[in-house]
Image: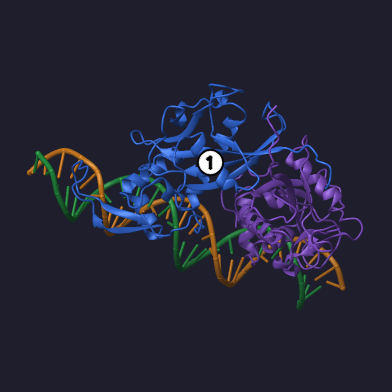
Chain colours: A blue, B purple, C green, D orange
Amino acid sequence: MPARIERPVLSVDVVLFRITEDNNELAALLHRRASRPFAGAWALPGVAVRIDETLEAAAKRALEEKGQLAAAALHLEQLATFDAVYRDPRGRTISVAHIGLVPLSAAGPRGDVAAWRPLSSIERGGLPFDHGWILETAVTRLRGKLRYTNIAARLLPETFRIDELQAVYEAVLGRRLNRANFRNKLLKIGLIERAGVLSEAVGKRGGRPPHLYRFTEEEVGAQDRDFV
Amino acid sequence: MPARIERPVLSVDVVLFRITEDNNELAALLHRRASRPFAGAWALPGVAVRIDETLEAAAKRALEEKGQLAAAALHLEQLATFDAVYRDPRGRTISVAHIGLVPLSAAGPRGDVAAWRPLSSIERGGLPFDHGWILETAVTRLRGKLRYTNIAARLLPETFRIDELQAVYEAVLGRRLNRANFRNKLLKIGLIERAGVLSEAVGKRGGRPPHLYRFTEEEVGAQDRDFV
DNA sequence: GCAAAAGTGTTACCACTACACCCATGC
DNA sequence: GCATGGGTGTAGTGGTAACACTTTTGC
């Protein structure tokens, strides 16, 4: 056995995204820190990785323990690993940041130690550690992947109206899209397809009843070209 | 002080790429492992991260200690973090893989414990640990970034002939490109510019002497659109 | 002049944009 | 009918791909 050498601690942090129901903005899950350092501050959920768990398992544990929500089924992917030497005042900690996505329909966090916060309301500089930078990196990545993958599927229920889908794209990209071209392109390249049925008399807002659509591919990332 | 808990060890592995001079293929640096496990096998250079060094510093150390070459100035970027629980038989080790690029002109590895190996000659399944998978991921990432960044600059000297640049693109992408359209597009979008002087009587191969070109942007990643 | 390689121009095609128009429903 | 929102078609524009052509050198 070699002598034990002091090594960095490895942790995971998760940026969990959702679309706000009302104003169609992007929101992230923050939790209120219970202990030092930065006790009381709102931060990204994170935990130290155990010796026998994968990063994805650790990320889901962070969401359950710190984010107070059931994380079993949600979409998680690696973002990047943050390694600044002094990013954690407790000692050397390297963090593998993850992006998570939950559909509108999913249940929110229990209690009040965790909450959805619209991105516009989050002061990046006010987040502890390097979490402001992690959040910024996550938004940039999500925005990029929206343009060439079907990742938006993970922010919506199984079937959806096409205007909901467009709202997701507009919320993430932060700009308006042309309604006609949006639907034409996504249908032509086969990213989405009709789910067959017309939406029944639920949530009528007047006007012609919309079709329902679904994403054609099950897996995220099979695509290769620009959608928007 | 809390009780010490058994945690994963954190390491870095580096996929260092170069273009082969002769046949214009992509090559990676492998080193011959000196100790168990997999003693004698060719593997990616990697080291365990020290408590006071960044990942990039660890990656450069890996290239110097295992790859036997001076790594101070080269281009390094993070690829992804590999976390399979049994990827290392010695015990739980999570590895942050990096991609490195060196220009054609750079010095090769010293000695014979490290060598450039053309990708076509590397049997992915023959690499130890999950290095075959890491290598595959690295090639895919490099191929992707070539299409929307100026990362090719890191595989070439400061100034270069345009046919050299096209050879780099073809080597990485693994397909032939149209000569006329290649030059027209890269010049029109301003990715490269003339370096002013004609190449003097060096390496004449007959025909009209070529201009020299350079990349316009210094930083990698400032670009946003498809080049090829 | 001829060969060879660099560099330029031309044309057809396709994708994207903007916008007008049609369709189906509630009232 | 009229308002409302879903759904479709079209013309203009600009980028891409294929390829022919011109330019500049060595011999």
Residue B204 horizontal side relative to residue C19, left or right: right
User: Callout 1: residue from which chain?
Assistant: A
What residue is disc 1 on? A61
Which residue extends farthest right? Answer: B111
Residue D18: percent from left, percent from top: 56, 70
Residue B22: percent from left, percent from top: 80, 67
Residue B54: percent from left, percent from top: 75, 38
Q: Say how many tags the image has.
A: 1
Identify the image quadrant of the C terminus of chain B.
Answer: bottom right
Residue B118 horizontal side relative to residue A216, left or right: right
**Towards the viewer: D13 or A1:** A1
The vertical placement of B99 against A204, above or below, is: below
The vertical placement of B219 against A33, above or below, is: below
| Residue B213 visible in the picture | no
Identify the image quadrant of the N terminus of chain B.
Answer: top right
Per the image, label 1 sits on a secondary structure element best described as helix
Picture quadrant of residue B173? bottom right
